[in-house]
Amino acid sequence: MIGGTGNDRAEGVAFDVAGNIHLTGTTFSTDFPTTAGASQRALRGVRSAFYVVMPPDLKTMLVSTLTAAAAPTSDERSRRNPE
């Protein structure tokens, strides 16, 4: 439904009083779709967090932006810094 060609994962969902769907998650996609006026349109680092708002009919994205580089997971940290 949404996402790019990389590994994208929704991690949170909420609904507002108008029925709009708010999604947050993580993307590894260099081509994750964003909307005009997005605060960040390009992936930073290996992955970024995303925030998307869609209307109840899911036909468009009202808002889609990336938000900085996401913090590495404990698995990613251990692969970079093996003990």
Image (spheres, rainbow, N blue to C red):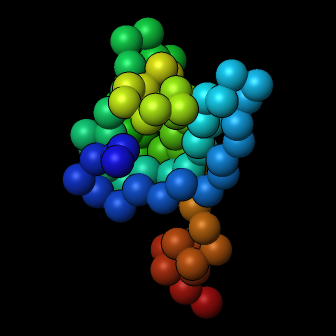
Residue 81 visible in the displayed image: no
Which residue is located at x 41 percent, y 56 percent?
8
Decide if residue 52 is on the left or right side of residue 6: right
Question: Outermost residue, right direction?
Answer: 17
| The C terminus sits in image quarter | bottom right
Which residue is located at x 66 percent, y 30 percent?
19
As displayed, is residue 5 above or below residue 61? below
Which residue is located at x 29 percent, y 57 percent?
6
The picture quadrant where one finds residue 20 is top right
Decide if residue 21 is on the left or right side of residue 18: left
Q: Position of residue 69 (x, y in %)?
A: 52, 43
Q: How many marks?
A: 0
Q: Position of residue 78 (x, y in %)?
A: 57, 80
Decide if residue 42 is on the left or right side of residue 13: left
Which residue is located at x 42 percent, y 26 percent?
61
The picture quadrant where one finds residue 67 is top right
Decide if residue 33 is on the left or right side of residue 48: left
Q: Position of residue 52 (x, y in %)?
A: 52, 33
Residue 21 visible in the displayed image: yes
Toward the viewer: 57 or 35? 57
Toward the viewer: 73 or 12? 12
Toward the viewer: 55 or 77? 55
Q: Where is residue 26 in the image (x, y as percent from the top left)?
A: 51, 52
Question: Outermost residue, front direction?
Answer: 57
As displayed, is residue 60 above or below residue 4? above
Question: Outermost residue, bottom direction?
Answer: 83
